[in-house]
Image: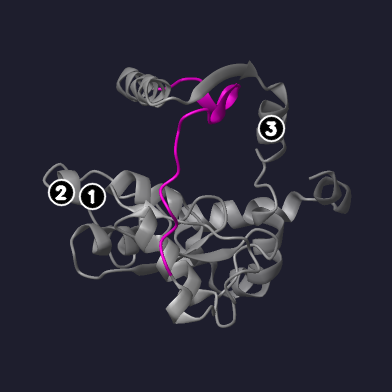
Amino acid sequence: TVEFAFGGVGINPHYGTPRNPFDRGCGRIPGGSSAGAAVAVADGMCAMALGSDTRGSVRIPAALCGVTGFKPTASRVPRDGVFPLSYTLDSVGPLANSVACCAVFDAILAGEEVSKAAAPEPATLEGLRLLVPRCSLLEGLDDAVSQAFERALQQLRESGAMVAKVEMEILTKAQELHQDGGFAAPEAYQIHRPLLEKHKDDYDPRVASRIAMGAKFSAADYIQL
């Protein structure tokens, strides 16, 4: 797992980076930050692994390792005992082999009665309206990724869903607001400031640089988010 959960690739220079089970020989990345959790589920070492998700730390490794990850509403699963990255965005969620499995584990983690923890009924795609935003989020994709994405959209259409592509400049602007670290950087800097002053050399330099971005944030910058 990435140090202090601050990274989407899955690299850990202290204890080693777990290799993606689908191409371990090549050494492909597992995604992060919950890299070990996703690899453990994909390898069959556990039925469910627990991860924290601030800006994708459950969903990214789940996607890259071929399992399912779920980020619940921040307040749904208690964060007691979880070392924070971002007070605003952190949540705790499961990684498992299917949506159904995640639904059951999420109910248990949220403290619902175990007898009521059940997978949801499969949804029908007939008539479902989906929007694909035209924005910077989909720019610069590798050809293989772009083609796979379009194939997935076509399968959804063939299954009865109505897929529309719409210009969404607001999402590009929202992404620009996070170029300097978004909520995570200033909140993480506030948490780590005393540790960085004494132990910066012990940090993963990539993680330290991301946290340090928060030092430049003004109150006005934070409120603008």
Q: Which residue is drawn at 45% across and 33% down?
A: 125
Residue 79 on image: x %, y %: 59, 76
Residue 145, position as x, y percentages in the image: 34, 25
Residue at x 33%, y 55% (from the top left corner): 98
| Residue 9 seen from this side | no
Depth check, front residue: 59 or 154:
154
The numbered dot on residue 20 is: 1
Q: Residue 176 carries which label?
A: 3
Quadrant of image for the N terminus: bottom left
The location of residue 29, given as percent across then percent down, is: 29, 46
Residue furthest left in the image: 25
What residue range appears in magenta? Answer: 118-141
Residue 130 at least partly seen: yes
Question: In the structure shown, which secondary structural element does the residue marked by tag 1 occupy?
Answer: loop
For mark 2, what is the residue? 24
Is there CB contact under 8 Å for labels 2 and 1?
yes
Q: Position of residue 220 (x, y in %)?
A: 88, 48
Kind of residue sitting beneath label 2: Arg
| Three-letter amino acid code of the residue under disc 3 | Glu
In the rendered view, does 216 fall on the left or right side of 82?
right
